Every structure is written in C-alpha cells, then in structure tokens.
Image (cartoon, grey):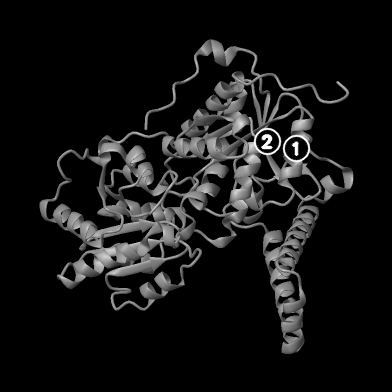
Amino acid sequence: MPAPAPLPPEVLAADPPVRRVLIECTRTWFQGGNTGIQRVVRNVVRHSAELGRRRGIACEPLVLAGFGAVRPRRELRARPHWVSHLRGYLLGVARAALGLVALLIPGPVRRWLVRRAPRGRLARLRLRLSSLARSAGQLAAGILSFPMEFLLGRRIEPGPGDLVLLADASWSVPGLGGFLADARARGARVGAIVYDLIPIEHPAVCAPTTRSFVDWIGRVAEHADLVLTISEATRRSLADHLARSEHASRSPRLGVFRLGTELDLAAPGGAIRTALAAALDPEHPLYLVVGTVEPRKNHALVLDAFEERWARGSDARLLVAGRRGWESRYVVERMRLHTEHGRRLFFFEDLSDSELACAYDRATAVVCASFAEGFGLPLVEALSRGVPVFASDIDAHREVGGKHVVCFERRSPAALAAALEAFEASGRLPDGVQPPETFRWPDWWESSAELLDEVQRLSRALPRPPAPPGR
C-alpha cells in the first residue's frame, strides 16, 4: 500500500478551509479498550493536537454526552470509565427485572398476547424500549461524567470552519444522527473513518446487532462530506456500496490513510506474568495469533492446522491472545479443554501491551487467518518488529503486507500447516517473499499526520457550505 502523497508546503501554508477538527471519541472515552478501533482513536487524539497546530488547524476530542457534545477533560485510556461499569450493572439489573416480570405472567396469557398483537408490533416495541434505554443510559452517563458542563451549559456546537470527524465506533451512540444534522445546519462539515464493511459484506460472521452499523453507514452517506478508509481495499468496497445506495447522488469524497504500528501502551521492562513467561519458552517454535476471538478471525482453522501438526509430532507452540467476542464460546471452550492447553496451546484474554510486545518479540511467526479485515493491525505490528507473517489470502492482507507476507487459503487448515512446516524445515521464507526486516510502515505520529493531510486535501475540493440561517 503506497503512502499518500504529502501536501506541498504552499498548500499546508494556505488558509485551510477547515480550521477545527472535532474528533468524536465517545465510545472509547466511556468504555476504553485496547483493540483495533480504540487503539486508533486513542493515538489520533493523542497526536492530532500538535500535528494540527503545525498545519494551522485546532484538533480537539469530542464526546456525545446525551445532553450535547462536550470536550473531555481527561485523556483517553484503555480502562473503562467508572460510569461505564455503573451503566452496565444497572442495565443488567433492568434486564433481570424485566425477565422476572415476564416469568410472572402466566404462560397462556403470554401466548395470548403474542397471538393477539399485530404482526411485528412486539418486535417494534422491544426495539423502541431498547432505544429509549440506551438514550437514557447515555444521558445519565453524560451527566455523571460531565456535571459542570451539564449544569453550566458548556457544550460544543460545531459551526462554519469546523469538521466533525467520526473516528470511533459511533454506530451505537444514541442521538448521533440528530447531532450531525444540527452540525451541518450550522455550517459545519462532517467526516468519518470507515474501518471496514464486514457487517455488510460478510454478515454471517458478524453479530446480529451490527444492524446498527448498516444504519450508521447510511447516516455517513447522508451527512458526510468526506470519508477516510484505512486501506485501498476498503475504499473500493465503500465506493461500490455508496454507488448502489439510496444516497448515490451525494456520495462523499473518499481518501485513505495508513494505521500506525507501535504498541503505544507498552512500557520498557514492563511486568510479565509467570504463565506467559512459561509459554514463551525459547526452546520451542512459537506461533502467535492476535485478535478478538470471533468467527471472522478464523481461530478454528488455526487450531485445526496445529492439531494436524501436533498429530505428526511437531513441538511447535500456539499462543492465542485476544478477548472473547461474539460467538466465541465454542472456540474458547475448545482451547480451554484441549489436551494441549498449557503444554503446546496457550490462551490469554487480557495481555497488556508490554506482554504483547514480549510475545511478538519471542514469536517465530505471527498467523493472521481472518476471513475478512479492513486492515489487519497485528500484521503490521509483527512485520515492523521483524517477525514473519502467515496471512489469509484476502485483499486487505495482500495490500498491507505486500510481498512481505506468506499467504495461504483461508479455508484450508492443510495449506497453513504445510506452509508452517516448510518454513520450519528450511529456516527461510518461500521464494518471492521479502524478509520482514525490510518492511517499512508509519508509526502513530506519521499515521495521524497522514489522516490530517487527507482531511485538508479532501476538504479543499469541497464546495463552500451554505451559510447557516441568520448569517
């Protein structure tokens, strides 16, 4: 994937059409997290203030707090905000109470209600109640987190010269559509980062709740002036989707920027738990899989491949690092109950960046087996550390890894097992695959710079927005 062309100095020095970029980071601010999107949001927010200053643009984080948009006072963290814990607890209590009420209704009465209700009415009522609960939860969390802003009416109201950039997983944030419509009515621009279109292109490997993502893409098409993707493959997919959508007549301008590579929370000499240190025994080949355990990550294929190898006497170890995701129970139980668990198979759900850095540095190679990706952060994290990568043959992996990755058929455990065995036997990568030491990729500072340069480039090509009422 080639680097976007940098803006010439005369363009950077010119008066920018966007003077302030408001980086929406609601979900990461409240819920934390250290996987793909959260890592991107945290690093973009961290670096954009200084990078923007050098470009004549003010860059500020923005959180939708239920009563309006506010600027958070603390930095983004991997740990969830305490309000998020409280909200989760209260929602759990509410669900339990509703379940208890349902059990108290006699069975014949429940069946009569279902039979007598107009078709779809109960489902729509359930969705409506769920939406109201999310909105109420967001408002309560916002008031508890930003009491002074709520009491004093300190809200961010985007206007002319502003760009609201949806950088986070904002498809589940209540009130987003109304906020964007109001921002545009006041003369602000709207931009978004689209990380992938997997819920649309591969719904079978995504949670049913990703319907909200489909709606979000519709809001992006309706309101956004520009959209940034994280790979050319995703840009092509998005362009095709928008061309077929009901908003095809006003498709936003599209750009691409590359994600960074470093584990930003890793501390030199950080503590490593005893169980992980044992798994990293240098006497055995070690293969690392990094990513949330969910169907699209294809962990089952990797397990199948290693079971083939173990049956033939291989002493290679497999270390899986990733939190549990949607439909992960089968794979997690398969690992936990496996006869090789703790011997040649290891599973960690909560590695710190320091521990993950140690795992990368010790790994013989990293395996990225996903059915679908928008980018593939573990791929560049590994290659940037000089670690070989075996990746499934999907567009994003081929684009990002180029000639530095060994590709295998994503539905063939035997193909992966054969590739790993050939690598171990020969001690070298296949002909035509370049050594990982020659891989070059931007860090998070450079990634954030690419993002802001793309924002400037795309915004200069936009027509001037209509003046807001009263101006």
25 lies above or below 366: above
The part of the image, by quadrant, that contains residue 46 is top right
Q: Amino acid at mark 2?
A: His
Q: Residues within 10 Å of mark 2 (few under 14, many from 20)?
A: many
Residue 11 percent across, percent down from the top left: 55, 13
Vertically, is 78 above or below 460? below
Q: Is label 1 in a helix, a strand or a loop?
A: helix
Residue 259 appears in the figure: no
Per the image, label 2 sits on a secondary structure element best described as helix
In percent of width and height, residue 437 lies at: 26, 38
- Residue at image position (45%, 60%) is 351
User: Which image quadrant: the N terminus?
Assistant: top left
Q: Contact, CB < 8 Å: mark 1 with mark 2?
A: yes
Q: Amino acid at mark 1?
A: Ala
Residue at screen point 11% across, 55% down: 425
- Between 122 and 442, the one lying in front of the other is 122
The quadrant where residue 101 appears: bottom right
Q: Would residue 196 be found to the left or right of residue 32 on screen?
A: left
Q: For mark 2, what is the residue?
A: 223
For the residue pair 53 and 7, the one nearer the viewer reads as: 7
Determine which quarter of the picture holds residue 294. bottom left
**How far apart are the two marked residues, 1 and 2, measured between alpha carbons?**
7 Å
Say which of 59 and 396 sits in front: 396
